[in-house]
Image (cartoon, rainbow, N blue to C red):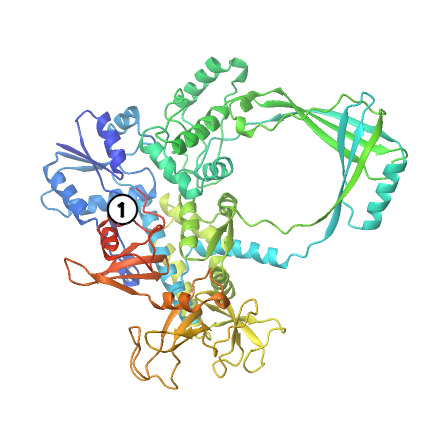
Amino acid sequence: MNLLIVESPSKAKTIEKYLDGAYTVRASVGHIRDLPKSNKKAIDIEAGFVPHYEISKGKEKIVHELQELAEKAKTIILATDPDREGEAIAWHLEELLKADDKVKAPISRVTFNEITKEAVTEALLHPRAIDTNLRKAQEARRVLDRLVGYDLSGIIWQKVRYGLSAGRVQSPALRILVEREREIKAFIPETYWTLSATCNTVKKESISFFCTEEPRERKEVERILSEGKSKPWYVKEVKESEQKRSPKAPFTTSTLQQSASSRLGFSPSRTMQVAQKLYEAGHISYMRTDSTTISKQVLESIATLIQKKYGKEYLEPREYKTKSKNTQEAHEAIRPTHVEKLHAGNNEEQKRLYDLIWERTISSQMTDAKLLKTRIVANVEGDTIPDFSVTGSQALFLGWLSVDTGARGEDVELPALKQGDPLTLVELTDTEKQTEPPNRYSEAGLVKELEARGIGRPSTYAAIISTLEIRGYIEKINRSLKPTDTGEVVSTFLEQNFMQYISDTFTSEMENELDDIASGDRDYIKTLKDFYTPFKKDVKEKEKLDKATTLEVADAKYKCPICGSGMVVKLGRGGKFLSCDKYPECSGALMIDGTEIKADEPIGTDPETGLSIFTKVGRFGPYVQLGTMPEKIKGKKQKGKNPPAGGKPKMASIPKTIDPSTVTLDMALQYLSLPRILGVHPESGKDVTANNGRFGPYVAHDGNFRSIKAPLDVYTITLPQALELLAQEKKPRGFQKKK
């Protein structure tokens, strides 16, 4: 028996069909080993940044099955994906199999850029050893991310708030979004006017012109209106020019994410998920690439298709080169595996993405489109006002636009006019407007910006955005990315204290150094040591900083509701709020908008305990409190609905979506009812509970957690419903490990 190991079960099924029983094909289901979670000591720094791996949780059974098969195999082939992650997975598999004394078969590595019978068969003819440099590059990235994340997150926990995090690549990405948000907040709008003139030609054809200037003064607007309405209009200039539009290069990972976002409305993570399915089904080539090249064989197939389907005049062979010096030219661009297959995919999303890839691939080898651009300029007699103009466009030869129809704009035909022709004014209007602040980044826009600045790599962009969203640093608003209060605070702290490590230059240079490890041009240990030695020293020095609880001084118009002193802005779990600058001597607090929360006035009484219930604002945001805080709290943290006399009163957070001033007694009692004990588990006899957490409502039992999704509700879910959820297979949170 011959054993071939890939990452994905669906990929394994496809390949096994191609090999006609010659190989038993199995999947590792992504990574099988990793660094212990949240454990810096998993890396032996003194020994040369040596990582100590362990089998990933839940992968023990898979490893056991693979070892059993390997023990019986005559040949073992590792055919994981053709990139750093794939090379690392292959190495981990090799290490585990070699550690099994019963495994005697030789182990080799193959790669293929597409899952077709031809590609797989050809790859098996050229087995090789694990690429040590490529594997080391992945390991360096993993180790570096762990060290940076651990140390930066630790200092943020100490100086800002427990539970926050930072990362080598996520933090520069967050900084870009925060910088844009500051530009938006600092923007001062200016008033301007746009003017349009609707005229008739001699032949009574209507044509609309637009002023080439946008006056900032009303006086100038009135002058233009007066002159325009009192003087005759004429055609000042007619200019025609033939223009060419060239096709775009085949897709890389980043350009596919951008186009899928703008054309299809897919998020980068969704694009990669759909592309993964197309790849595993053998429809497209490998979707993690920064290369725009296409193999000679495929180019010939494209040329044949274009000539047959569109005609010889539409064919123009082209060669594209990626500007990045670290482009993996051995890889190809993302393309269909069989260009003659016009459509592919098992569902609507897959079909739409495949069509997009097919169109981009075919059009990249086609002739330029030829367009006729016409610009007509109009003015009044004597040219006493700014020019008014209109532009039209007409396709003379579609070329590549006949395939990539989504890139084609609509033809705008204008009346046939010549210089000096008279015009009759029908209407002259003005519209008052205000300048707009810069737009927030969309996901596609951020991907483009990250690529331009050399931050991260194409395969990581989707994960970066997902991480920022999962950690509550950004939120999506109408397809735009907006930093949250927490995101702004974390970014500001890092900018003030660790700017050199989250700057574009530093991050880009570090990416290049990691690429150099992959090519064998840099040493693993030296690279990590050169970075980590000064970084660790800087982190150690920052431990002397005072706790950064105060973000900034609040507007002078806000005064403490208790003592009348000034206010400062602080960050709680519920976002920013205003705190008395004399805290802790004075506990006065306001919502960030200045709304007062009258904590000394109860909103009602708990019918069960007879204790008063209050709304308050604390370091973690607004909350409800059962009873009053004693002068001195004796004893440990209290649990239960009715705290012992002298103990800490029970508290519960008010959801971010709720205005604290609108909280009623019933709402407060509901918040205070959590966590709910639903009953005991029939097998373990331990409690099953329902509660709200960082990632939303959930049920829990003996360290096992499951999210509560609508229509179920944390306040009404029953024990049988909770047991059903707990019995379901646990799904990974956020972005998943690459399969």
**Quadrant where the N terminus lies?**
top left
Outermost residue toward the bottom in this view: 631
Nearer the observer, 557 or 615: 615
Amino acid type, residue under disc 1 in the picture: His
Question: Within 10 Å of the Cα at label 1, are there few (<14), some (14-19), or many (20+) other Cα atoms?
Answer: many
Residue 155: quadrant of the picture: bottom left
Nearer the observer, 499 or 126: 499
Q: Residue at label 1?
A: 31
**Quadrant where the C terminus lies?**
top left
Q: From this view, report whether residue 140 is shown above or below residue 21.
A: below
Q: From this view, report whether residue 184 is shown above or below residue 230.
A: below
- Residue 485 x/y as whole percent: 50, 62
- Residue 641 x/y as whole percent: 31, 73
Residue 245: quadrant of the picture: top right
Question: Is residue 279 left or right of 236 when viewed as pictured?
Answer: left
Question: Is residue 524 left or right of 362 when viewed as pictured?
Answer: left
Q: Secondary structure at mark 1?
A: loop
- Residue 185 x/y as whole percent: 61, 58
- Residue 123 x/y as whole percent: 27, 29
Q: How many marks?
A: 1
Q: Residue at x 80, y 27 (%)?
A: 200
